[in-house]
Image (cartoon, helix red, strand yellow):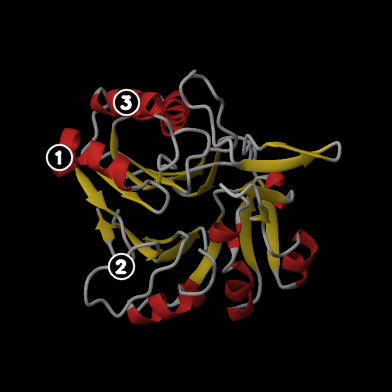
Amino acid sequence: MKTRITVLCDNIVGLKSPLLGEHGLSMLIEREGESYLFDTGQGQTLFHNAISLGKDLRKVNKIFLSHGHYDHTGGLEKILTLKGEREVFVHPHAFIPRFASGKDNKVRNIGMRCSRSKLEEMGGRIHLTDSFKEVAKGIYLTGEIPRTNAFEKGDKNLRIKMNGKLVQDDCRDDQSLVIESPKGLIILLGCAHSGLINTLTHVQREMGRRKIFSIMGGTHLDSCDEVQLKETLQCLQNTPLEKLGVSHCTGLRALHYFWNSLQEKVFVAHTGVALEI
């Protein structure tokens, strides 16, 4: 069973590349004649990059969303305009208004730009997923990920409104995609707001601690403290893993840690990079 995963949107592009970068993430999964999309980026570069890479987004029939932030869901409307009905798998909390506070204490809206009703009007067949579920043959969404360790505390700058007040958003809608392959499991991360190690623990619990071949995507370690970074690295060193493709919200500091310790296992999963098994 041949599987090809291509990064269509990421913050980084290669030198002298015709592709464009944006703060966002989207990956195309091609498998047994089917095409699936994991996240849609902001929507500014998705079509340009897909065309440049020779990928026909009209063939995508299922879209999996990691969480409800604009940089992962912004291209959803454009995808839905391409072709009739498409199945969209998303956690129910993804539609809740989300905010982020910066160093200047200003609060900005980082939630989805389109309501559920609007997406349904455009042909999106919404499937709400909050638990581990097979969403295509050999492909699983993790659903809501339990927070089981003490060092992954979440991003304190993310906000959600409760009882009229902005409080820390624990990103309950954060979920990852798991793909079976002959070499082991492939785990695709949106931002891993639940924590990279919490995500791995959850996947191993649900899949019976099967071998993990590769992890790709955003790890949201760019704003974490040293304790979380070191604990994460130690756990990864103890996890049999052949490839770690970091991107989007991982940050240069975390990339440096990974590269020094895991060496040839690590690669930058920037726009245009493909993993084929």
* Image spot of residue 130 (x, y percent): 65, 38
Q: Is residue 135 above or below residue 3?
A: above
Specify the farthest residue to the right: 163
What is the CA distance from the residue labelled 3 to the residue labelled 1? 16 Å
Q: CA distance from mark 1 to mark 2?
A: 21 Å
At a point 39% along the width and 76% down the height, the residue shown is: 49
Which numbered disc covers residue 230?
3
Dot 3: within a 10 Å radius of its alpha carbon, few (fewer than 14), some, or many (20 or more) residues?
some
Mark 2 or mark 3: whose residue is earlier in sequence: 2
Spot occupied by residue 41 in the image (x, y as percentages of width and height): 51, 63
Lower position in the chain sequence, tag 1 or tag 2: 2
Query: Which one is earlier in the sequence, the residue at label 3 or at label 1?
Result: 3
Give the residue number, with chain letter if any, for mark 1.
263
- Where is mark 2, residue-wise? 13
Q: Is residue 152 above or below residue 180?
A: above
Left or right relative to 94: residue 139 = left
Residue at horizontal 53 percent and vertical 27 percent from the top: 153
- Helix, strand or loop status at disc 1: helix
SS class of the residue under badge 3? helix
- Where residue 191 appears, as percent x and y from the top left, is 48, 46
Residue type beneath disc 3: Lys
